[in-house]
Image: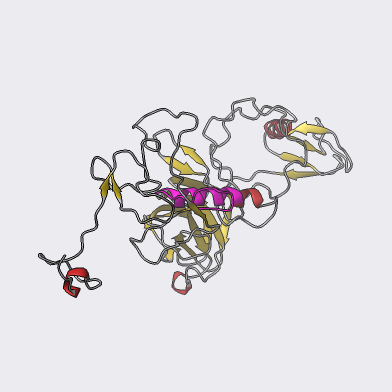
Amino acid sequence: MGKKTGRETAGQEDVAHVSGDHGVQILCVRKDVAGSICGADGDYAPPQLDATGAVRISGSVSAATEFSEDAAHTTADKGIMTLAVRKDTAATTVDADGDYSPLLTDANGRLHVIDENSADIQDAVETIESAVAVAAGGAAPSKVMQVGGDDGTGDFYAMKVDTSGQLFVKTASGSIASGSIASGAIASGAIAAGAVAAGAVVSGAILAGALADGSIVTLGAKTDAKSTATDATSVSVMQVLKQISASVQASAGDLEMMDDWDDANKCRVTPVATDVVTYGSDTVFDADADNTAQVCKAGSGNLYKLDIYNSNAAIAFIQLFDVAAGSVTVGTTTPKYVLTIPPQGAASIDFAIPMSFDTAITYAATTTPTGSGDPTVGLTFSAVYK
């Protein structure tokens, strides 16, 4: 054997291969059946190759740990265990993007996973947990589930409430059938004074015949239209009206009125012919009411009727001011009256008692009851005033 040089027996670390490099060949022994080829423990031994030239290694993957695709499980099958790292709070365990990393599990052994809907699923879970945790009368949850329904055309609309939390409910014309409210169903005093706001019941909301004769009664009147200070006899409003009508028809010229307690004291009213003066009303129409203060009437007056339509998908409000339009700062000036207009809905009010304005009648359309937000599409505004 010739003399070996440093060039033939060694190479520098991290130096690229070059054709013609010299070195010492490592000899291996082909051994088709694995087994020792040395005499005793501690003897030198060459690496072994199988019949294909593959180096035999301890713990190699063999037929015992390889399985055909779609093969059924069999008891005592062998395989290589995949290790995972417990990480109670999901976080990376490697230094940079592209590094090998083990699977992670939480404290319960569940694998940390994420998919494209994870954020939505987490948000839904938090919404449910937040809603369940809120006790009656407690603070509003930070997340809520929207409740609504199909409008019949495939579009979804959410349920809406006003600023006091009351649910908007629309009763269709004719939904309360004639006679559906039985006589005595609404007890005396059941509806408190002021419970029904002016204009809350629009013209035509109660159909003719919907309230049966006698369903609304009044106290302190007898069927003979004579009463005492402590009389508790109940008669229907219709009976009282019939008695008044009969009294008027019975008096061809003079009209006698009873006082509260004693029919011996009468007040005689003699009709006097006089010219009838008819006072007309004025109207205003705005096809694009927005958050700018607009003039309905520049001076004092009375408001008799309002008709507003909101084509937006969101709720809107009409603010009325008893202030000249030039002096109104929408969102700062306190309105005299606020009317709620439901999304893609209308509101129509006939004021049984006209609403009086001492300075001016001014209006504006906004997205909040007392704010200055401008509806996406202007509201249609009509008013009758004098």
In the figure, is residue 231 to the left or right of 96?
A: right
Extreme residue in the top direction: 179
Is 333 above or below relative to 188? below
In what quadrant of the picture does the N terminus appear? Answer: bottom left
Could you tell me which residue is drawn at 10 percent across and 65 percent down? 20
Q: Residue 279 at what x, y percent from top left?
A: 49, 52
- Relative placement, left or right, of 317 versus 59 is right
Q: Residue 179: image x %, image y %?
A: 64, 25
Q: Is residue 3 above or below residue 35?
A: below
Question: Of 301 and 36, which appears nearest the observer?
Answer: 36
Residue in front for this viewpoint, 142 or 115: 115
Q: Residue at x 68, y 48 (%)?
A: 195
Q: Position of residue 199 (x, y in %)?
A: 57, 48
Residue 215 falls left or right of residue 27: right
In the rendered image, residue 133 lying in the magenta stretch gets the answer no
Residue located 23% across and 45% down the image: 53
Q: Is residue 126 visible?
A: yes
Q: Is the image coloured rainbow, by chain, by secondary structure, or in one colour?
A: secondary structure
Along the horizontal axis of the image, is 181 left or right of 264? left
Q: Is residue 342 visible?
A: no
Number of numbered discs present? 0
The boundaries of the magenta stretch are: 105-129
Magenta-drawn stretch contains 108: yes
Q: Residue 183 location, x and y as percent?
A: 73, 28
User: Depth check: 42 or 295 in front?
Assistant: 42
Residue at 24% x, 71% y is 14
Q: Nearer the viewer, residue 43 or 164?
A: 43
